[in-house]
Amino acid sequence: MSSLDYQQLTEAELRDYVKHHPQDEEAFQHYLKLVRAKPNRVVVTTTEQLEMELRKN
């Protein structure tokens, strides 16, 4: 458990923190919660789906 206050970090700061502290599960879960809450989020499960989404627009 970390004493870092994730609420005070911007999404970019939190992403950077998670990259440099992969062992901090609490920070990672908080970051996932933020990412999953974004509107218009696209979830792909295969490479083919990813390629199709990247071709859009």
Image: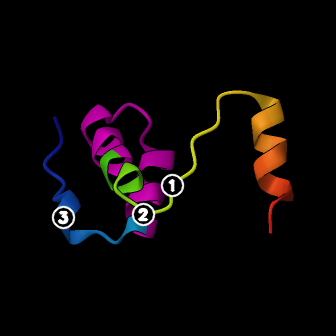
Magenta segment boundaries in residue numbering = 12-32
Vertical arrangement, residue 24 with respect to residue 19, above or below: above
Local secondary structure at mark 2: loop
Residue pointed to by mark 1? 41
Residue 32's quadrant in the figure? top left
**CB atoms of marks 2 and 1 within 8 Å:** yes
Name the residue type under label 3: Gln
Residue 38's quadrant in the figure? bottom left
46 and 8: which is toward the camera: 46
33 and 25: which is toward the camera: 33
Residue at point 57%, 49% (across, down): 42
Residue at point 39%, 66% (across, down): 11
| Image quadrant occupied by the C terminus | bottom right
Q: Position of residue 21 (x, y in %)?
A: 42, 42
Residue pointed to by mark 2? 39
Going by the image, does 9 lie left or right of 35?
A: left
| Image quadrant occupied by the N terminus | top left
Name the residue type under label 1: Arg
Residue at point 65%, 28% (across, down): 45
22 and 42: which is toward the camera: 42
Q: Residues within 10 Å of mark 1 (few under 14, many from 20)?
A: few
Q: Residues within 10 Å of mark 2 (few under 14, many from 20)?
A: few
Q: Earlier in the sequence, mark 1 or mark 3?
A: 3
Q: Position of residue 49 (x, y in %)?
A: 76, 37
Q: Is residue 18 magenta?
A: yes
Q: CA distance from mark 3 to mark 2?
A: 20 Å
Local secondary structure at mark 1: loop
Residue pointed to by mark 3? 7
Vertical arrangement, residue 45 with respect to residue 16, above or below: above
